[in-house]
Image: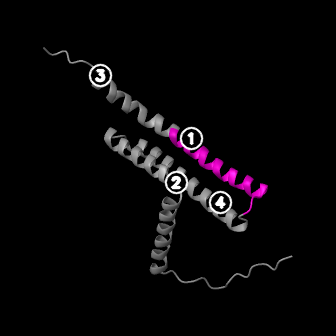
Amino acid sequence: MPAPLEVSASKPRFSVTARLKSFVFAGRGLRSLVQGEHNARLHLAASLVVVAAGLMLRVSAADWRWLTLAIAMVWLAEAFNTAIEDICDHITPDFDPAIGRIKDLAASAVLVASTAAALIGLITLAPPLLEQFLSAQVPSTSP
């Protein structure tokens, strides 16, 4: 049985520099995700389209909360999926049925998040989009 992890009695002191570095590391991870994963670039394009549509349609603050949550949910799922796939590939680059199942489970999270986000986007953006489309189709009655 492995020995329990030793816990240091003193915690490192708070450092603004260390906190700022953590943002740099997170930014590096996000850049790596977008540059290295085709699906992340698709998520980026979809995120930009949703934000542009929300701005053009002037959706409410409540709608922005839902859209923001949906976008974040997809990005979180994609980042975790990529991290899990990278860990699995590092553990064994060869095919392993257990690793394959783990990767499939992680990918399914992205599918669920993306489907939910698409539904949230549809429920949120379709009504004002339809309203704008229909108002543009009404013929003018002035002579």
Q: Earlier in the sequence, mark 1 or mark 3?
A: 1
Inter-mark Cα distance, 2 to 3 = 38 Å
Q: Which residue is mark 3?
A: 137
For label 3, the SS is helix
Quick check: 38 left or right of 47? right
Q: Amino acid at mark 3?
A: Gln
Q: Which residue does the image show at 51% across and 64% down from the upper left?
A: 32
Q: Quadrant of residue 112?
A: top right
Quick check: 126 left or right of 99? left
Magenta residue check for 98: yes
Q: Nearer the viewer, mark 3 or mark 4?
A: 4
The secondary structure that dominates the magenta segment is helix
For label 2, the SS is helix
Chain part drawn in magenta: 94-118
Q: Which residue is mark 2?
A: 38
Q: Earlier in the sequence, mark 3 or mark 4?
A: 4
